[in-house]
Amino acid sequence: MIPFNKPYMTGDELYYIKDAVSRGKISGNGHYTKKCHDFFEETLGFRNCLLTSSCTDALEMSAILIDINPGDEIIIPSYTFVSTANAFVLRGAKIVFADSYEDNPNIDATALESLVTPKTKAIVVVHYAGVSCDMDMIMEIANRHNIYVIEDAAQAIDSYYNGKQLGTIGHLAAFSFHETKNIISGEGGMLVVNDERFDKRAEIIWEKGTNRSAFFRGEVDKYSWVDIGSSFLPSDVTAAFLFAQLENLQKIQSRRKFLWNEYYKGLKELENKELLKLPDIPDYATTNGHLFYLVCRSMEERDTLISFLKDNGVYSVFHYLSLHKSPFYSEKLENSNLPNCDRFSDCLLRLPLYYELEINEQQKIIENVIQFFN
Ligand SMILES: *Cc1c(COP(=O)(O)O)cnc(C)c1O
């Protein structure tokens, strides 16, 4: 069986973990946490980064930072992972779901204006498959209404909007290093602070509501409880693992992008014959080889293709079940008609894409898909 995903180990992970252990300090904000922060800030050009235990954590930190009060509204796409919404629901926010574009699962920026109310506090955008949302339009609407933009950049490492790294555009951004993402640490994530007004408080919330970081820098003479917060920082063992991955970022990325392009070329003919749709990458966006999807013409066809591939030794999967139809949230909504989002839920299929996927395995997958449609 060709699996859907296989986490890639670069080979240096245990070396750095051993080093972290031998340094005798493996709690958070240690040697390797700083090395990762430096890599993100100095090599990749992010402004201010804080490693977290997950992207979910980074989103929860964002919700605390923008001071959500019960009743505040947050606009998010319905076609996303639950954490995008849950982080804000935990703080009492009301979620307003937006639809996807017709030809792209990302949030439809042209529909945002009509969703903004005096209670709107933030728009959370998700760069689905690492493909950028329409950031100029989104930032313009947000700035005009004085609301925050938070990028759920969980899938968006090494991907760009008009040349700008995703996660550097909104006021805050959240990345994931879960083992299903491009760069991994098992569980892991990062908050990026792009608006300096959040710098000081982000560090406090990260360190359980204390000014411990300022204390260790010698800025205060004792550390105390100064705000709400939680234990958002990962152990230095996790950071050591992540550092090994970061050093191999370009190598991992060039392989993943190569495989993505092979799928695209191999399946293009089926799209030309209007048998399926392939990802549509807007001019302002790039692909980072995070995931490869195709869109079938109906749910029945999609489900039959999944079974067909399985019978031929290939695991493929679908996602996301629209959040506006979820058992938890659907009853809280008055009306929500999000046809594009529903169509991606029903018809989108993801093919195996991971560093160690071999060319002959990928050719077999492509041939199977072609055979199915013929
Ligand atoms: C993976 C993912 C998350 C959650 O990331 P964790 O690190 O597992 O918390 C959130 N949003 C999106 C869009 C994701 O793809």
Image (cartoon, rainbow, N blue to C red):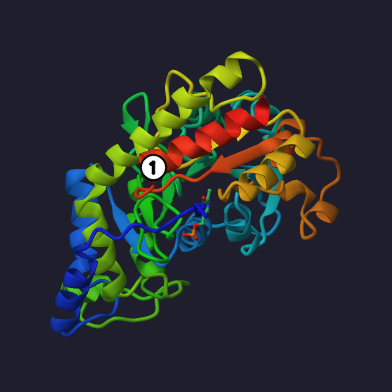
Frontmost residue, 263 versus 25: 263
Please name the amino acid that badge 1 sits on. Answer: Gly
In this rendering, position of residue 187 left or right of residue 346: left
Tell me which residue sits at (57%, 36%) in the image: 368
Tell me which residue sits at (36%, 23%) in the image: 162
Frontmost residue, 251 versus 175: 251
Across the whole image, how many numbered discs are drawn on residues? 1
Is residue 76 shown to the viewer in this render? yes
Q: In the image, is the residue at mark 1 within 8 Å of ligand 1 by its beta carbon?
A: no
What residue does disc 1 label? 167
In this rendering, position of residue 9 left or right of residue 57: left
In this rendering, position of residue 98 left or right of residue 179: right
**What is the quadrant of the C terminus in the image?**
top right
Residue 321 screen position, x and y as percent: 71, 49
Q: Residue furthest top?
A: 272
Residue 343 screen position, x and y as percent: 73, 34
Q: Is residue 199 above or below residue 281?
A: below
Residue 306 screen position, x and y as percent: 66, 45
The secondary element bearing badge 1 is classed as loop
Tell me which residue sits at (56%, 50%) in the image: 313
Residue 236 screen position, x and y as percent: 26, 73
Is residue 219 shown to the viewer in this render? no
Label 1, residues with CA under 10 Å away: few <14, some 14-19, many ≥20:
many
Displayed quadrant of residue 10: bottom left
Frontmost residue, 74 versus 15: 15
Frontmost residue, 267 versus 227: 267
